[in-house]
Image (cartoon, helix red, strand yellow):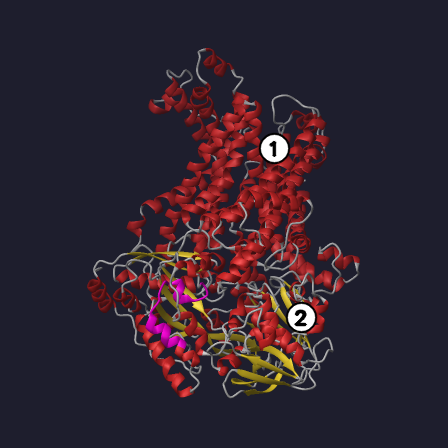
Amino acid sequence: MQRTLKSLTVAAGLALAVGGASYATSPALAGTPKNMMVMAMSISDLITLDPAEVFEFTGGEVIANVYDRVMMFEAENLTTLVGGVAESYEVSKDGKTVTLSIRPGQKFHSGNPVRAEDVAFSLRRVIKLKKTPSFIFTQFGWNKDNVDSLIKPVGGKVSITINADFSPALMLNALSAGVGSVVDEKLVMSHEKDGDLGYGWLKNHSAGSGPFSLKTWKSNELVMLEANPSYRHGGPKMSRVVLRHVPEPSAQRLLIEKGDADIARNLTPDQVNGVAGNADLVVDNNPKAALVYIASNNAHPILSKPKVRQALRYLVDYKGMASTFLAGAYKVHQAFWPSGLWGSYDETPFKLDVAKAKSMLAEAGYPDGFKLTIDTLTSAPFPEIAQSVQQTLGKAGIKTEIILSEGKTLWPKYRARKHEIIVARWSPDYVDPHSNADAFAHNPDNRFEAKLTGKLAWRTSWADPAINAQTEAAAMELNLDERLKMYHKLQADVQMQGPFTVMFQRNEQVVRQKNVKGFVSGAIFDLVFYRNVTK
Amino acid sequence: MGRGPSLPPFVGKIVRQVSTLLLTFVGLTAITFIIGRVMPADPVLAIVGDRASAEVYDAMRLQLGLDKPLVVQYVIYLSNILQGDFGKSIMTTREVSEDIIRFFPATLELATVATILGVFVGVPIGVFAAVHQGKMVDHIVRVVALFGYSAPIFWIGMVALLIFYAKLGWLPGPGRIDVFYDGIVEHWSGVILLDSAIQGEWEIFHNAFSHLILPSAMLATYALAYIARMTRSFMLDQLNQEYVLTARVKGLSETTVIWRHAFRNVLVQLITIIGLTYASLLEGSVLTETIFAWPGIGQYITTSLFNADMNAVIGGTIVVGICFVGINLLSDTLYKLADPRARQ
Amino acid sequence: MTDIGSSRTGLRAWLLSETPGSIGQARCQRFYLVWLAFSANPIAMGGLFIILSLVLIAIFAPLITSGDGTEQVLTRRLLPPSAEHWLGTDQLGRDMFDRIVWGSRITLYIVALVGIIVVPIGLLVGTTAGYLGGWVDTILMRITDIFLAFPRLILALAFVSALGPGLDNAVLAIALTTWSPFARIARAETMVIRNSEYILAARVQGASSARILLHHVTPLCLSSVIVRLTLDMAGIILTAAGLGFLGLGAQPPLPEWGAMISAGRQFLLDQWWVPTIPGLAILTVSLGFNLLGDGLRDVLDPRSDS
């Protein structure tokens, strides 16, 4: 009897191990196919693929590979703005009107030719749909009533007129943002429903002329792109690109080490150190324009004191963090426009100096410190940064409590000015210092009812008339040397007086298989190119 | 299992169960709905993003109908649900009902295989322990079973992935299927094992099954411990009854006594327990799904929750809740039908 | 029971006397008999040993650690276990031993607080429903059923999301999802008790319903509720750890074990001790509660008692 029972139990217990062993030779473990690039990354932020609406990292990256933009940066040269769908442009003498010539012979994935009408349609569509990124265009004075006359196709060209005090250089930069993507008017309008300009359909379909077209998007699972063999630079080598949703960095690490992913995007610095010994893997470093900063709320009675704000800037262990748990992934940067881009300001006047901070706090009337809450995101490295800041603030007597939240919970609090200090990140929308100056420095109306929620200066209740004037003047300036000087001064002033403690600039560490080459990732989040990848 | 002082007829019991189901349904939706509306995560921001201007924000808030009083919103929502309309998910841009059809089979597959594993290992262990009650083997079996019950699944899952995937290479990594097999099998039931078998795609069946082993084994440890524990307890009950003694006295073999007599009598109780386990695995797979990147309903609900995607959260919760209640009801009914004592 | 021995003297004799002289003595006797059965059960004793160790570690935490487990030394991060750091250091250079020890207080805090909230609510709802019956019973039990039907972890997740992350909110959320089985148990017990002569006698003497519930019914329900609570403790610990793992429980720098696994999981491959040690701690403690609960049930549940 005992034998029967025992054997039964053992048999059942071994079912697992046997099952496991028999699958050891499964073809599934042979790596990824030769003509397919599999990227392990988190795609949970992806909620739309309509270029008039995309404003998240993953979405921005996908549409950059599916749509050609009016103006763009190319994978081969990430720093020079060139024509994309537009072949060339002419600026009128008054600097108000830009005329774009369309590159001949281009085709959408559908086979439709790319026309001036498609360009005008795409740009007007952004204004008419009025989704989040539309502010990039509305600042030029365009609205749904005047856009049809300010942006129009004329004899195979597109004429664009600026209706505000902005330099045309800034406008051309803006046309290289995601909202500058050119969509296939005929295809999109054939899917229009209730006057939505095809919005409902384009959210999860593609109608572009870029190197790839969208094959499938399964939210929180994968995005699959298919090569466009007739792309103007030649068809991509990879016939498929898969963005596979792997939210856990540790799982990404396992996949890349086992060869089940070609590229891993979200490894932490410590994990990157861990794969250093693996001869099959290579780590690429791509400097990014993303910043990590602390914002202190100027409406807070204590934090509104300039001395206190300055003291906070001496209570961060910039070097300590950047040389340990952030090593390789972040470097110290203390101004609002990132290093490596035109107009950057690379001075780092602050370092951890508890004694200096203490004396400043004493001058401000808080020799024994005070209490604060630190809000930040749940994802790495924010909890670690917050804890380090908590420890160094504690050395000056500032007692803090950390609250971790997901972005969807944290941003409403920040936008409603309910935070005390917050550790957050920022990435510019297009490659022009105005993109960040507008966020960090410009706050023309500090009243709560003004609800300038897109601007970080407003969110922190900080408004300085002199700084506002500087920001506006710099955006309008046509002389580049003059403009450069203005941005340096503006950044130095905000660095000393503002409510922000800019701490770090990101360096993306992409881990790839040795044989996977040609993946290009530029400074801005949507400057990522898959088309040159080979295996 | 009988509750209530009097003994209503069997039909009355069913009617009451169904009314419980309905009430539960209303309660489930109400609670989830209220939570969704008071939580600090903002569904409007989930759509428009944190840099949206006030104008864009307000337009979306209006479009979502969030300006109406809470009660009105709830009534609208409830009447939509009754027409089968769970609304659209923000995250996936699809109808929530479509999403559920896509995600639920993954969880069903996982929980079913885990329950089967739990039964095939747990029941023999439980019987074994009962037969040897009080002996060393009994204690060892119980402690080992309790280990499965005590381990944090998110941790043990990570360790298992490390050992069986990264170090030994016996089993494939996280995910439900290798990406290059994705989309080949037609979505018929959504259960890949079933779909691939029906369509004769054995390579895919093989691949999907190998992906299933680790997460279902993790989930099964919990089921196993519970089933083993309950089996032992039920068996002890039977083994101490007089008829067992009588059978032994009559000279029947131990195997016959245990399996033909005692075990047959605990079957009915076991079914209830297995039903309960199955139901709790359906809802309890959240953390397993996170660790194994398993695109199931648990992960769907959690990610939706973090993204303030309340239509998705409520829809998912209702489906899981109804399955939970439904399975309990079913096992309860089976129990009543099979056990003449309980029918009275 | 087994043979109890022949030398009945002093306390032992008093405890085993066949004719107790007072209600107090009778109660003590009952406890002693339970204890005798309990201490003969190695599984239960193992569980008790683990839990007592946990309590002692928590009480003497300041004596056995060198700090409160939050001091960071960035230059000494991710060190393996050594004589200086018995369990190594974590990603911010904090001593893991200190953190585990201080974390035991958080675990006990969660378990105790959930128990304190859940038992009274369960008893109140269950005994009231069971004793009064009728529509009160129907309403209370329907509410209980709704909570029973809810996916537990998901409900807890939703509650914490609504209340905001944090240790106390996590405790509250767990309590909200845990009370319903207690109400069911208390109700079932009450239905058995309410028609007993002892309750009838109290009613005849003119005791109010509230008084009967509080003084006569509740104490009798307590033992089965406590067994259930012990069995649930492991589940509570695992749920709390799960919430911590998802970032909704204790906030940093508190050394809550689930949150420690969550923050340390990226180090599993290279610095195994960072996520492994808190995992083992959770496993040990929840095993302790399971063993204890299993043993207690063996002793108190007449079914498995032969």
Which numbered disc covers residue A309? none
Considering only vertical position in the picture, is B156 above or below B336?
below
**Distance CA(mark 2)–CA(mark 1):** 64 Å
Which numbered disc covers residue B236? 1
Which numbered disc covers residue A206? 2
Q: Residues within 10 Å of mark 1 (few under 14, many from 20)?
A: many
Q: Quadrant of residue A108?
A: bottom right
Amino acid type at image mark 2: Ser
Asked whether C183 or A199 is in front, the reply is A199
Chain under disc 1: B
Asked whether B313 or C131 is in front, the reply is B313
Of badges 2 and 1, nearer the viewer stands 2
Which residue is depicted at the point 50% across and 37% down?
Answer: C179
Considering only vertical position in the picture, is A217 above or below C238?
below
Q: Which residues are magenta?
A: A453-472
Q: Secondary structure at mark 1?
A: helix
Q: Secondary structure at mark 2?
A: loop
- A164 drawn magenta: no
Q: Is residue C193 left or right of residue A110?
A: left
Magenta-drawn stretch, dominant element (helix, strand or loop): helix
* Rendered-image quadrant of the C terminus of chain C: top right
- A461 drawn magenta: yes
Asked whether A484 or C240 is in front, the reply is A484
Would residue B258 be visible to someone looking at this image?
no
- Residue B327: image x %, image y %? 66, 40
- Residue A429: image x %, image y %? 50, 73
Which residue is depicted at the point 56% across and 31% down?
Answer: C141
- Residue B260: image x %, image y %? 72, 34
Mark 2 and mark 1 on one chain: no
Amino acid type at image mark 1: Leu
Asked whether B324 or B266 is in front, the reply is B324
Considering only vertical position in the picture, is A46 above or below A280?
above
